[in-house]
Image (tube, coloured by chain):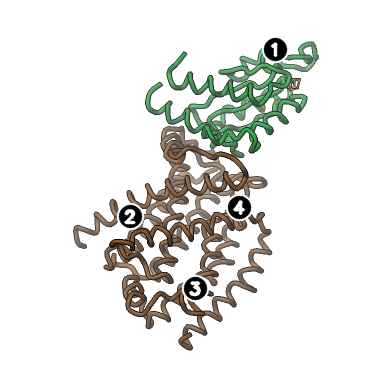
Amino acid sequence: MRPEYLFYLLVFPGLLFTGMLGLVVGWVDRKVSARFQFRVGPPFLQNFNDFFKLLGKETIITKEAVASLFISAPFIAFAMIVLVSAMIGTAMFFGSSFGGDILVVMYLLMLYSVMIILGGASTGNVYASMGAGREIKLLIADELAFILVCLVAVVKSGYTLKLHEIISFQNDNGAFIGSASGIIAFVVGILCIQAKMTLPPFHIPEAETELVEGPLMEYSGPPLAFWKLSHLMMWVTFPFLLILLFWGGFTLSGLGILWAILKYLLIVVVMIIIKNTNPRVRIDTALNFFWKYAAPLALIALILAVLGA
Amino acid sequence: MGWYHKRLAKSIWVFHVSASPCNNCDIEILDLLTPRYDVERFGIKLVGSIRHADVLLVSGIFNQKVGPRVQQIYAQAPKPCFVVGIGTCPASGCCFKDSYNISKNIKDIIPIDLYIPGCPPKPENMIEGIVKLVEVLNGKE
Ligand code: SF4
């Protein structure tokens, strides 16, 4: 292990950077959503205030809860997201490997969902367990399409699994989004992200109106703060992953910086628009959607990629 | 009333406790959360779970059935947690004050930090009340 890894993990593409950017993008999300509803929306530092407020509240552990799992789940999930963002960020900004490839990224992102399931199921609350159950179903729904989408990029970059090699391949041969298979996979990818982040229309596990935040229902204080923070950090991690896989990463010089910000904001805004214009779907509709339409589409993209289109 | 309370004042998550009101106050509370008044400007958010709440908005007269439940809900809220009594009901019993079933001493059930009188109070009144609570949190008496 090299010493700069610690810097990657804790400061630049990892913890500090992604955390800060996530809190800011969370504000963008809330503000744009508010404008959709003809409201003014929260002030800029709202998410920071929310986070620090939650850090100072009491942590309540219910009598039925499995205390060790209940407390450790949010922190493990947070660690997963930090690790993933460090891996993706290192490949994007430094063009080097942090020690993990695309398979590890897929595993860690899945483990995040598993942590939500474990955390929710350990509370001993009926609603939270129901939310955890729905999270499992959602994971079953979106995982196949997500893996196929990732595979498209792998195939197109000449069967390499290394994140920075996918980027450098695109820098030499043009971004994958310009090709037929790339654009299909990109669109399916955005939908998968929506489900992985449990944003509307796929916020089935959290369903405020029926399950009152589902798995997070019994959490209070610092553990809740870390759940919220890791969820906001996904607003950074997932769009970065899509840009990395299909849109040629970032070039950080001159106009490239502006272009990088534009790419990122474009994906975020598309996600916010989908989020605000769709009502929640039922769990069977979501399963249907991903297995009948999204996954076959991704499979077609994969076949096209293998054929070289 | 230091740095932490300033953060708390800017991010108040409210939980709505309906303790046997005539339902009118509840409707006004819902009005407060509509786009027209947009309390998210002040960082106020309605949460569905008591574990996330900073402020309980209670309305109604706390009759003998609902009183112990309100007490239980208050015990489940993570501290620091404040209680705002919405309407004349928690303050004085309003038109129900002579009913046979109301709890005589609401103060014994939960400590109410702020009353917003009115039957029902207008959303503007409630915003003013919350602003007062924020001022107290910020250290201005
Ligand atoms: S204060 Fe008036 S409007 Fe509100 S619950 Fe009591 S009687 Fe109803």
Q: Can residue A73 be seen here?
A: no
Q: Marks 2 and 3, Cα distance to the nearest angstrom? A: 24 Å
User: Could you say which quadrant of the image residue A145 lies in?
Assistant: bottom right
Instruction: Chain A: give its colour.
Output: brown
Q: Marks 1 and 4, Cα distance to the nearest angstrom? A: 43 Å
Quadrant where the N terminus of chain A sits is: bottom left
Neighbour tally class for label 3: few under 14, some 14-19, many 20 plus, Cα within 10 Å? many
Residue situated in front as seen by the camera: A182 or B87: A182
Q: Residue at x 49, y 33 (%)?
A: B11
> What residue is pinned by disc 3?
A149
Q: Marks 1 and 2, Cα distance to the nearest angstrom? A: 55 Å
> What residue is pinned by disc 1?
B92
Q: Amino acid at mark 4?
A: Asn
User: Secondary structure under badge 3?
Assistant: helix
Q: Are marks 2 and 4 on the same chain?
A: yes
Q: Name the chain under label 2.
A: A
Q: Disc 3 beta carbon < 8 A from ligand 1?
A: no
User: With respect to residue B96, does A32 lie above or below?
Assistant: below
> What residue is pinned by disc 2?
A14
Q: Name the chain under label 4.
A: A
